[in-house]
Image (spheres, coloured by chain):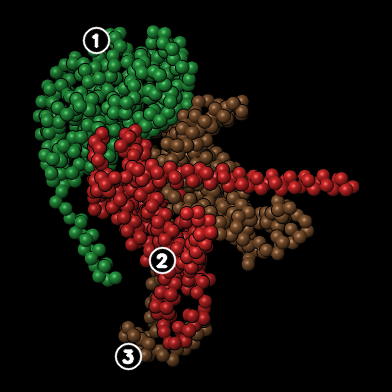
Chain colours: A brown, B green, C red
Amino acid sequence: MEQALNQKSVNNSPAPEGPDSLHLGIPFKLQDKINVWVLRTLAFAIITMLATLVVLLFKQSGEAVKEFGLWNFISTDNWNPVEDEFGGLSFLYGTAVSSILALAIAAPVSVAIALFLNEMLPAWLGKFLGLFVEMIAAIPSIVFGLWGIYYLAPFVKETLTPLLKSTLGFLPLFQGPSFGIGMLTASLILAIMIVPTITSICREVFKTIPGHQKEAALALGATRFEMIKLAILSPSFSGIMGGVVLGFGRALGETMAVAMVIGNSTSISSSLLAPASTMASVIANEYAEADSDLHVAALCLVGIFLFVITLIINFAARSIVWHFNRKHAR
Amino acid sequence: MKHLLIIAASIFFATQASAITKVNGAGASFPYPIYSKWFSEYKKVKTDVQFNYQAIGSGGGIRQLIKQTVDFGASDAPMKEKDMKKAAWPVLHVPTVMGAVSIAFNLDGVKALKFDGPTLAKVFMGEITKWNDPAIVALNNGAKLPNKDILVVRRSDGSGTTSIFSDYLSTVSPSFEKNIGRGKALKWPGVTVGAKGNDGVTGVIKQTKGAIGYVELAYAIKNDLPTAELKNKNGKYVAPSIKGVSASAAKLKDDVYNGDLRISIVDQEGDDVYPISAFTYILLPQTKETTQLKEVKSFLNWALTKGQAMAGDLHYAPLPIKLSEILLKKIK
Amino acid sequence: MMIETTNYYRWRKFKNRFFQFLLILSAIAVLTPIFLIVQYTFVKGASSLNFDFFTNLPKPVGESGGGMRHAIIGTLYLVAIGAAIAVPLGIMSGIYLAEFDKKSALSRILSFSIDLLTGVPSIIVGIFAYILLVVPLKSFNALAGGVALSIIILPIVTRSTEEILKLVPDHIREAGLALGLPRWKVIFMIIVPGSFKGIFTGVMLAISRAAGETAPLLFTAFGNMYMSYRIDQPMASLPVQIYNYAISPFEDWQRQAWGGAFVLIIIVLGINLTSRAIINRNEFVNFFIELNKKFKGKKVK
């Protein structure tokens, strides 16, 4: 097709008759050149805009970097807006713990649901429930937060906490009082929210397994479980990993649902029942009312850390999934 | 399609022009119930002015004022010297009403509690952790209190209410003053939950059994939360009320009114005094008069005269009449 | 030897049963809370709605009859601004990525940037718009909110347009060129209109996502208790209004928060499902035919 363009066009002259229906009076080659350059300018504009935003973000956080130093900021646990002292370790901790815990709960469950929908249900029901799961991904996170405050938090306080304390209460993870809102509730809500992401990727990945592989395993006398393990899970492992990491990326950036149920405490606690904060939730809660320029700068710096971490995780996920697709392209 | 775009564009540009003057303000959530009532009533008086007030906390109000993103600010905590210096013009602190910071709690089967300053300070410092702690039981005539954890709720944003409360606790407890101190945002020890605004704290207390927190009286009453009686300087136990708040300002001398007005009235002497009372201020920029500023001043004229009568219904104490008179002169 | 084989077989059978049991358990474990959330919101939300909700502005604390009219209109307004900026831009960049300069640096950097934008947490998008528009204009404003939403809409529209256009086989392009059309006409008058359904779906999905976003609007459009149409003033939106009411203690406001959540879900899921139905029209119809057949057989009455 490129050749067709590069050949000298017979219809180069601005003919009033013929395909030049807009009667622009300029040769086609020029029209196309203008078009390409308009598009290129738009592309360039988008890239420049993005670069400007990133640069502005870094500039806005400059005061905090100057005052506290990059490494020192993220390794100190001292968030004191009234004294203008800022150290973001507790938010890094909160983000890490809530996301990892959410992933630990969601990953196996998502794979299980993907298998359930693909393998154990008749096709039409699998599609229908699959659609249902995907709709969850579309529900705005504020609705999850709302449900979390009024339904999940009391449940965690009245039912789950006594259960955990009576069975695993010796662990430092479950010490201290439970407000209902706190790290555990936030992790549970995050888990529910990232399941659709991981499930839909796993389903796609499982669909790429050719039917005859599964039949071969069954023909050799495997039980259904063994067939799944051999023919589906083993070859899809990297694809599943990609989905899991993508879900992790989603959990890291989730703001509203977490902000509403995590309790907003800026100190680090070893107990899952204690309130906490994540990088996203502290920005959501404090930005609009940040007291001083240094406070805003510190929040922007927290934002940068969140931005960079999410970026790394997302690209890791993408490259894993890309490698998988290369290996198993249909 | 083209016609649709033209119609959309003309509607868009038409809506940008409006005859209504919009005034933006932001700040304390402490007086939000009375302010929102006032703005709504004032709109009936002056229909072409619309006040848009965001209750983002006193700290936010001060910052927005300095950054000039709002026309007026509101704060329960008077601006500090360094904030006053950052402002491009002098700022007049205009007290509008007085209110009480009540200690609200949510405890099954307990409708009344008594606290004194030092014990309360210990609870908020995390030194007293159970409801049936001997110190609390002793203050309450040996009442049967449950063996449950005290769940402390405080503000997560820059709050004038926190400022007033910590002012009180620092006054009555040297230990609190040393370890935590006064301020709009504090480093609370122990395991506490932070919520945004007086409404956020009220919401958490309401939702969480065993919780205790400090909120402006109107919020506690409107949400049927029981509040504690506090021991005042004269040794009497007083529940938060308009009478208790007014009594706190009763002893102020006239020269105070002519001075700075950035005064603290916590822990005053008097049998009827409720110890955690305070003024709340509107922060008025003393600068060249814009349309917005003119409207704010005329609103304040209304609020300091007709508006004061509405304060009682919402459990705020009206200002001493002497003070209102002096303020009306100052605002000109 | 027969006995050992049988025992081992039984063990395998047990593992099989156990595993299938775990699968069903996990499915229930997740689908139950999700179903609960949806059902709870629907029931509580629908019962919270009344005529006042859609027609009134908020009333002061304690007075009943307040509504979210301003927030609903605000959401439509902000999404319209976001879409007006991002949809043309997104379709154009999608066209660029699919049709031109495939190996060039510009194209690759653009693709990378779009990928970057997809992964940006929505709160950071809010910070971007704040620095860009709130600080210079010295007030929260609707334009900043609209721009924040446009940053969210852009990568979705670009990616989906690119994917849809890539699906169009080359021979259609060649046919257009063979008929003597300049390349831009082949794209804008043949390829794009032909893929209209797919592009439209992508746009609708992006818009439904933007309509449900809260974080980018928290400190850009901020919020307003009154109806405002001005682009340089704060503007209420449904998600932010729900958020403010949800964390408040006032029961009437909480009730309105549930009502708002219900309306929001209806809008978001409505757009989502409708656009999916448009694209999968045949499948959709077949599904209902199947369902009908199954239940016709079981009709008791």
Q: Tell me if residue A275 comes above or below residue C134 in the rendering.
A: above
Q: Residues within 10 Å of mark 3 (few under 14, many from 20)?
A: few
Residue B142: % across, % down? 42, 8
Q: How far apart are marks 2 and 3 (CA)?
A: 35 Å
The reply to whether the C-beta atoms of the residues labelled 2 and 3 are less than 8 Å apart is no
Q: Quadrant of residue C268?
A: bottom left
Q: Which numbered tag is attached to residue C52?
A: none
Circle 1 sits in a helix, a strand or a loop, which is it?
loop
Badge 3 is on which residue? A16
**Are the residues under marks 2 and 3 on the same chain?**
no
Q: Which numbered tag is attached to residue B271?
A: 1
Q: Which residue is drawn at 12% across and 22% down?
A: B321
Residue A62 in view of the camera: no
Residue A113: % across, % down? 59, 50
Q: Distance between the residues labelled 2 and 1?
A: 73 Å
Badge 2 is on which residue? C200
What chain does mark 3 sit on? A
**Most extreme residue toward the front, as rendered?**
C301
Circle 3 sits in a helix, a strand or a loop, which is it?
loop
**Are the residues under marks 2 and 1 on the same chain?**
no
Q: Which residue is drawn at 48% across and 21% down?
A: B149
Residue B195 in view of the camera: yes
Q: Residue at x 44, y 72 (%)?
A: C195
**Are the residues under marks 3 and 1 on the same chain?**
no
Report the front residue among B122 and C61: C61
Q: Residue at x 57, y 30 (%)?
A: A164
The reply, left or right, for residue A13 in relation to residue B297 is right
Q: Which of marks 3 and 1 is in front?
A: 1
